Amino acid sequence: MHILLLILYYILCAYGIARLRFIRKSGIKPALLQLLFAIHVATGWIHNAIAWRYYPGHGDVWDNFEKSFMYRHRLLSQFALWKSDNNTLTHITHNGIIYIQMLLNCFSLGSLAVNTLLFAFIVFLGNIALFRVFRQRFPDDPLTSFTVFLLPSVLFWTSCIHREAVLYLLMGFLLFNMHRLLTRGISLKHAFLGGLCLLGIAYFRIAFAIPLLPALFCWWVAAKRRARRKILLGGAITLILFILLILPLFDLPVIIARRQQEFMSLEGHSRLFLPTLNGSWSSLLAILPYALLNGLFQPLPGMGGQPVYFIFSLELLAIWGIVLFAILRTIRNRQNPMRLSKEPLITTFGLFCLVFALFGMLTVGMMIPFAGAIVRYRSIYLLFLLAPFLHSLRTLPLFQTLNERLHSYLSHKL
């Protein structure tokens, strides 16, 4: 029965990908869209198999899937017990993926493979939204745009039923609506949808939403040159009010220290050295060097505890190699101002990417002492670290050739 459902739902998903106007507006050829979706789904199934074989307790995917049956039973037959599992905000946010599994079970008859397929279709819409933003913000550079779909860490961690997948979906539509606001003027529709996405991101992971706020502000300031002074003034006033009125209500060092302690209490084979926070600002400052090392550069090849993490360590080295090469190339070209004006290292959207990525990776390094967990929690940030620097290399002959071929064979004109 599950195999028949899998075939039926895949046909329906493939039909939707071919017919939905939002997807067709990406400019990607239908055959390639089908291939990208197939890769996404297959990676999700592979992730499930790897988690079953290598992760302690089979990982969060299988744990949430199994708990979804227990929660459904409690919801229908033991409501008081179900209520006790959802009596705090922490429980409610942590159970978000379990609720998604419960909903998907209604359509899949309790098959994780079918759940993964159905979930992949929804997340693929977010991929398309982000791709459309990249195509507009990184023009004449399909290579950078296609990293949205094919960057290994992003693909691996967003193809299964994880928080990362939901965050990636919401991130795609948040940036899509933000892009519309900046290019088409203020629109209540796009402002509302963007705000809704931001609230959804905060629900699933507040630590992911925090780096978004300064990054979005920097993008807005950089893009609105004529209104830059007003925006900066408004931002300064907002920051002052936040520090005076909001920050005292939330002891940020204590919140970060509690989150770190949650990770510290876990057992794992890839533990890294990370000083323990005591809830003070001084401890946050003292931990910065270790947070930068772990969040930006770990795991090194050979670390991580599982064979699959070796691939991600090589990916990380490759990304930092591209970043370093792009920076050195820009420094070398400073003797030619005309060339620099045509090839800025960081665009307005690139500024957003860089602020978001670095701030987010630093946050991950502060709280997580395990190389394996860092790989997962940092995965989405790597895309935004890579994109602006890869885009700055688009005029090199090799990248020009690749982009011309991609533009010719992989996509239509937008």
Image (cartoon, rainbow, N blue to C red):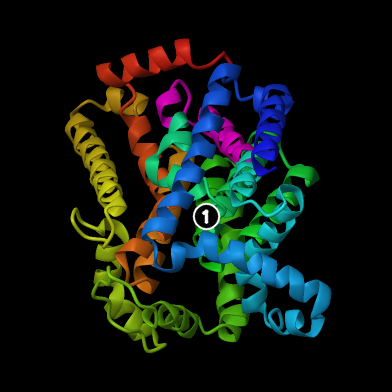
Residue 31 seen in this snapshot: yes
Q: Position of residue 165 (x, y in %)?
A: 55, 51
Q: Position of residue 322 (x, y in %)?
A: 26, 38
Q: Quadrant of the N terminus?
A: top right
Residue 346 seen in this snapshot: no
Q: Quadrant of the C terminus?
A: top right
Q: Residue at x 64, y 77 (%)?
A: 91
Magenta stretch, overall SS: helix
Q: Give the secondary structure at mark 1.
A: helix
Was residue 139 drawn as part of the magenta stretch in this picture?
yes
Q: Residue at x 68, y 66 (%)?
A: 69
Q: Where 360 falls versus 254 (above or below)?
A: above
Number of marks drawn:
1
Q: Where 302 falls versus 67 (above or below)?
A: above
Q: Residue at x 45, y 54 (%)?
A: 356
Determine the residue located farthest toward the top in the rendered image. 408
**Span of residues in magenta:** 124-144
Q: Where 172 falls versus 166 (above or below)?
A: above
Determine the residue located farthest toward the front in the rendered image. 1
Q: Residue at x 22, y 41 (%)?
A: 321
Nearer-the-camera pick, 360 or 74: 74
Q: Where is mark 1, residue-wise?
A: 164
Was residue 284 drawn as part of the magenta stretch in this picture?
no
- Rendered image quadrant of residue 21: top right
Q: Position of residue 102 (x, y in %)?
A: 71, 60
Task: Specify whether 244 is left or right of 140.
Answer: right
- Rendered image quadrant of residue 264: bottom left
Task: Specify whether 297 is left or right of 366.
Answer: left
Type of amino acid at the residue the image marks with label 1: Glu
Task: Specify whether 288 is left or right of 171.
Answer: left
CA neighbours of label 1 inside 10 A, class few (<14), some (14 to 19), many (20+): many
